[in-house]
Image: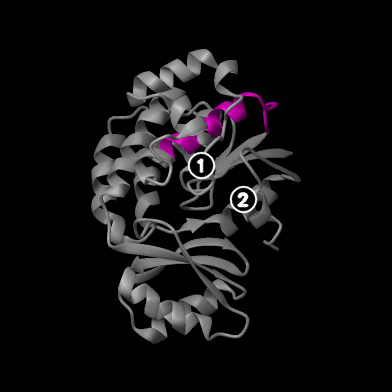
Amino acid sequence: MRCLLFPGQGVQKRGMGTDLFARHPEATALADDVLGYSIEELCARDPLRRLRDTRFAQPAVFFVNALLAAEQPRPDCVAGHSLGEYNALVAAGVLTLADGLALVARRAELMAEVTGGGMSAVQGVPAAFVRRALVETGLPNVFLANLNADTQTTIAGDRAELAVAGKAIAALPGARVIPLNVSGPFHTPLMAPAAARLREVLAEQTFAPAALPVVSSVTGELFDPADGADLLARQLAEPVEWVRVTHTLRALGVTEFDEVNGRTVTALVTRIH
């Protein structure tokens, strides 16, 4: 079985998708209409340097992912890391491209409103070690945000407490802590206000039956469209369970992992045993 994977925010760069827009004029015009600005200008040239802003980075990544997926052979199943899950839902027919883009744009706006926090990647130690270090340091506003691979996680939270946590974790044998250039404490309980507001938007959304199996990055299990609003709202304030996603995909029989827009998440898959 072949699974198509979708990365999330972080893969954006000026010039991405440059060759795609002319090949997909109808979709590009649709995106301009939904967003109210030129998606091609943002992705290909970014003259105002807006790709560093969550509000613009998320729609840009989502749309380029979608165009790349449209040029791929039909996969047997799909999954996406955080933002990429919206692409997986479009690929599986659960959301239309227009609805997915509109939801992503609103999601990005709400996430950008939560400031004062940060995220750091932790490499070289298992998640259990990181979790124990957070407990021992007694920092109430730092959390595990991404469980990406066997020895790669992301922590997030209050920026001051995050610095203290980073020093404690860096003292563990083999650990490396790398601050990430993000504006908020994504995938933690500190995002609860944004999650609640997004839930109101998602409650109005229709989720169609999935034409392909989709694995949820929140539960690591198959995505049930009947629970779509709840799962996508929870995504903002709960960890990305990428290790569980990978184990579920392998249990489904996936032996081939392809990825649109780079090798970010497939590289994580190779580090999960």
Amino acid at pointer 1: Gly
Amino acid at pointer 2: Val
Q: Is residue 115 above or below residue 138?
A: above
- In which quadrant will I find the C terminus? bottom right
| Residue 199 falls in image quadrant | top left
Q: Nearer the viewer, residue 139 or 245?
A: 139
Q: Nearer the viewer, residue 16 or 166?
A: 16
Per the image, label 1 sits on a secondary structure element best described as: helix
Tag 2 residue: 265
Seen from this angle, which residue lies furthest front? 47
Q: Nearer the viewer, residue 142 or 131?
A: 142
Q: Is residue 174 above or below residue 187?
A: below
- In which quadrant will I find the N terminus? top right
Tag 1 residue: 84
Q: Residue at x 49, y 13 (%)?
A: 26
x and y, in percent, of residue 47 in the image: 42, 34
x and y, in percent, of residue 102 in the image: 36, 29
Between marks 2 and 1, how big is the CA–CA gap? Answer: 10 Å
Q: Is residue 51 above or below residue 136?
A: above
- Whether label 2 touches label 1, CB < 8 Å: yes
* Magenta stretch encompasses residue 64: yes
Counting residues from the start of the chain, the first of labels 2 and 1 encountered is 1
Q: Residue at x 54, y 72 (%)?
A: 127
Magenta stretch prevailing secondary structure: helix
| Residue 70 falls in image quadrant | top right
The magenta stretch is 58-75
* Magenta stretch encompasses residue 69: yes
x and y, in percent, of residue 124 in the image: 62, 74
The label on residue 23 is: none
Q: Residue at x 40, y 24 (%)?
A: 38
